[in-house]
Amino acid sequence: MHYIYILYSRTANRYYVGHSINPLARLEQHLSNSGDKYTGSYKDWELMGVFEASTIRADADRIEKLIKRQKSRVFIERMLDPNFKGVGPLAHLIRVQHVLA
């Protein structure tokens, strides 16, 4: 399964959206990537939300790009709301709680 994940940095006061088959391992990569052009500048990324996206990587990639194209912090914060119901391509996203533990 490919997952969409949302990270948050308190220092930067920014969100980051990505996709991975292992969001926890990917978080560790973000935390250890010093100098990476976006996430490497901060070392306090927290995993805020994880969603099952698809068994097909290309589908997860499309969803990630759709979210990023919104260029909207409000949109991302709506996704993090426990009552979030996606529409269109986001309608089949399933929130995953156990990955955050």
Image (cartoon, rainbow, N blue to C red):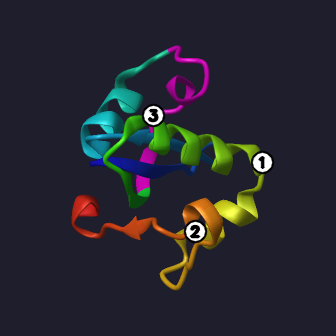
Kindly identify the residue that appears in the image at 55 percent across and 79 percent down: 84
> In front of the other: label 2 or label 3?
2
In the rendered structure, find residue 19 and report the number of the disc placed on it: none
Q: Are marks 2 and 1 in contact (CB under 8 Å)?
A: no
Q: Amino acid at mark 2?
A: Met
Q: Is residue 64 magenta?
A: no
Q: Are marks 2 and 3 in contact (CB under 8 Å)?
A: no
Residue extent of the magenta highlight: 35-47
Q: Amino acid at mark 1?
A: Lys
In the rendered structure, find residue 79 and report the number of the disc placed on it: 2
Q: Position of residue 5 (x, y in %)?
A: 44, 50
Residue toward you, 9 or 58: 58
Query: What element does badge 2 sit on?
Result: helix
Residue toward you, 43 or 49: 49
- Residue topped by disc 3: 43
Q: Position of residue 74 (x, y in %)?
A: 74, 65
> In front of the other: label 3 or label 1?
1
- Residue topped by disc 1: 71
Q: Position of residue 39 (x, y in %)?
A: 53, 30
